[in-house]
Image (cartoon, coloured by chain):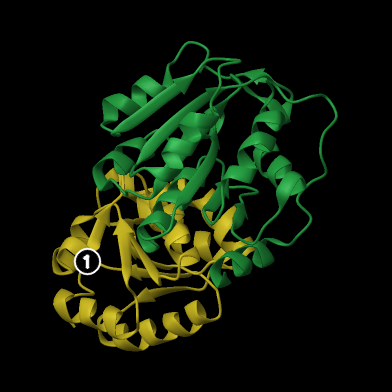
Chain colours: A yellow, B green
Amino acid sequence: MNAEEFKDELKRLGFNFFTGVPCSILAGVIKALGKEYIPSVREDAAVGLAAGAYLGGKKPSVLMQNSGLGYSLNVLTSLNLIYRIPVLLLVSYRGFGGKDAPEHLVMGKHCVELTATFGIPTKVCEKEEVKDLLEEANRYIERGKPYCLFIKEDTLG
Amino acid sequence: MNMRDAISKLLPLLQDAFLICANGYISRDAFNINDRPKNFYMLGSMGQASSIGLGLALARPKEKVVIFDGDGNLLMNLGILTMIAQLKPKNLVHLVFDNECYDSTGGQRSISAEINLADVAGSCGIPKVEKKKLGEDFMDSFKDCLNQDGPSFLLIKVERNPAEEMPRVDISPSEIANRIRNV
């Protein structure tokens, strides 16, 4: 699935509010979203913005690099999780397999257990299971849960 | 005038507007003085009341959205002013109660005594910005914000709350979210 098809799949599932902070791995999806993507200045503000949009009836998704998870954690734990405000987190997986620039290695080593530890359903997305995992994510979202999908460099070809 | 008295005076003016309350005494006082389904009480996620309000304003462009923010909250998420200025939602009123301290944690000083947050908002490009000194009347300015196109930013200098606290918000977070989504 390429970035354009990925965007179409998100729209088909009803996602209609997109914000975040960019990563090169997510560049294609952000480009495909065009004007529908609202640039946020920080990842925690993006998660807060998405929560407000949800309260107004939207179905939001937040795109970010895994480096932004740290900033977002307090909002996810003390807003999304306790209020049951769902959000689809599309998180680029920098530092996967320990091969990346040094600033990505620590978060790359621990990011999957980080979100999972806080009870956020979390999956690392392989190329061939993108569609299935978006469907799975959608089922959690419909039940009021956030969902974190890690996107690797080669996930969206 | 202290913040609680200011909140008491402003709440009756809201009519049909959504209200997003920052954490701490802002949420507590608004809840105890006049709870309504269109109020959202932020309990944690300090700094994010402005983000939540902006997101709601974008999602419901035909309805007025008011944010009751605090100086400590805004200082923590100052970048949101640039997003409000860039997105320019006409239906957003961003009101900041500035007591120059973190009242609910014991009144430790914030830096807003020396930093003019209204000037910051104006510099970011928010079209309508006003600041009210301690004791200055703010009712007409707030009415203007509600009746005119925004986004508007209104900073009101207030004194700390009286020592006697109001009870905590006693409806569950999920109930708070459900109510506002279904009004």
Q: Is residue A96 visible?
A: no
Q: Amino acid at mark 1?
A: Glu
Q: Position of residue A41 (x, y in %)?
A: 31, 43
Is B108 in front, or is A113? B108
Is A66 in front, or is B32? B32
Q: Position of residue B35 (x, y in %)?
A: 71, 53
* Label 1, residues with CA under 10 Å away: few <14, some 14-19, many ≥20: some
User: In the rendered image, which residue does mark 1 sit on?
Assistant: A153
In the figure, is residue A148 to the left or right of B44? Answer: left
Q: Is residue A53 above or below residue A128?
A: above
What quarter of the picture does the N terminus of chain B occupy? Answer: top right
Q: Position of residue A131 (x, y in %)?
A: 30, 87
Q: What chain does mark 1 sit on?
A: A
Q: Is residue B162 above or below residue A114?
A: above
Task: Give the secondary structure at mark 1.
Answer: loop
The residue positioned 57% from the left and 56% from the top of the image is: A79
The residue positioned 19% from the left and 83% from the top of the image is: A1
Image quadrant where residue B161 sits = top right
Q: Is residue A38 visible?
A: yes
The residue positioned 69% from the left and 44% from the top of the image is: B30
Q: Position of residue A134 (x, y in %)?
A: 36, 82
